[in-house]
Amino acid sequence: METIGLFGGTFDPIHLGHLRAAKEVRRLARLDRILFIPSFLPPHKAPGTGASPSDRLRMVELACRRRKGFEASPVEVEAGEKSYSILTLRKIRALSPDARLFFILGVDAFLDIGTWREYERVLEECQFVVMGRPGFELDRARGVLGGKLRDAIGPLAGGEGVGGPLPPRTKIFLLPIRALDISSTAIRERFRRGETLDGLVPVAVEAYIRKHQLYRGR
């Protein structure tokens, strides 16, 4: 059975921290491929800030190019509406009905799962790989929703990945990774100040940002 990781986000812009995290997750969880899914409009973000959805999708496409197992998915951008995980999950399921799907997200985002639209359905219809993030202890995930999900949370067994038999009750796998402390906000600020983005984003992404002057005056 194919295993697919769903890595969603604003990606404004996508950076080497995102790519490093995804590479670690794919290696440790032994996922066949990872879909990077830029949102059209995140539910909790005001419209009109940052780069356009089409620009963010294009940067993700450039970042995934020639990186094995990485793909850009236009499913949320093409929808042209607020991006809800439950809707994205069902669209990906329709495209890959026989695959085993895993949402990939940082522990900081997972702590807010109670605010997601139909989060109970999301938990029923897929599994999760929750990554450590700088400044957020991974074990905090066990206390989400007042500990309601504690019995469904467990570590990802070293070396086994998620392709084989999984613990029957475990739906949420905690995975410590060697994360790079890079933020899209800081990258946008550096560009506004005219500073280099070397070592922060792929070369093709920096070239795209400069060519289209995406973050000037924003």
Image (spheres, rainbow, N blue to C red):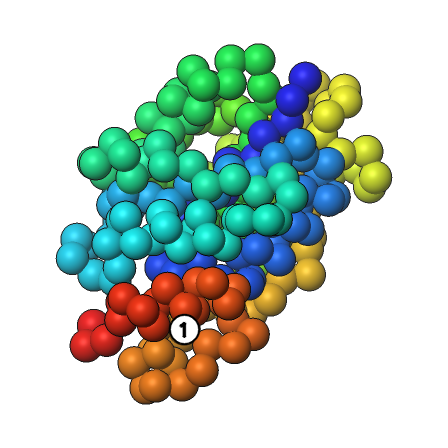
From the viewer's side, name the closer residue of 218 and 169. Answer: 218
Q: Can residue 165 be seen in this view?
A: yes
For image coordinates 36% across by 37% down, the residue present is: 74
From the viewer's side, name the closer residue of 140 and 211. Answer: 211
Residue 216: % across, % down: 23, 75
Residue lying farthest right?
A: 159
Q: In which quarter of the image is the C terminus?
A: bottom left
Q: In which quarter of the image is the N terminus?
A: top right
Reading the image, the residue beneath label 1 is: 187
Residue 56: % across, % down: 34, 53
- Left or right for 149, reference 195: right
For image coordinates 58% across by 30% down, the residue present is: 4
From the viewer's side, name the closer residue of 150 and 133. Answer: 133
Is residue 31 placed above or below 109 in the rendered structure?
above
- Left or right for 198, reference 211: right
From the viewer's side, name the closer residue of 185 and 147. Answer: 185
Q: The disc labelled 1 sits on which kind of residue?
A: Ile
Is residue 161 placed above or below 141 in the rendered structure?
above
Residue lying farthest left?
A: 48
When asked about the image quadrant of residue 194, the answer is bottom left
Q: Is residue 135 visible?
A: no
For image coordinates 65% across by 43% down, the residue present is: 68
Q: How many marks?
A: 1
Q: Crowding at label 1, few (<14), some or many (≥20) Cα neighbours within 10 Å?
A: many
When asked about the image quadrant of residue 158, the answer is top right
For image coordinates 37% across by 50% down, the residue present is: 58
Is residue 119 placed above or below 107 in the rendered structure?
above
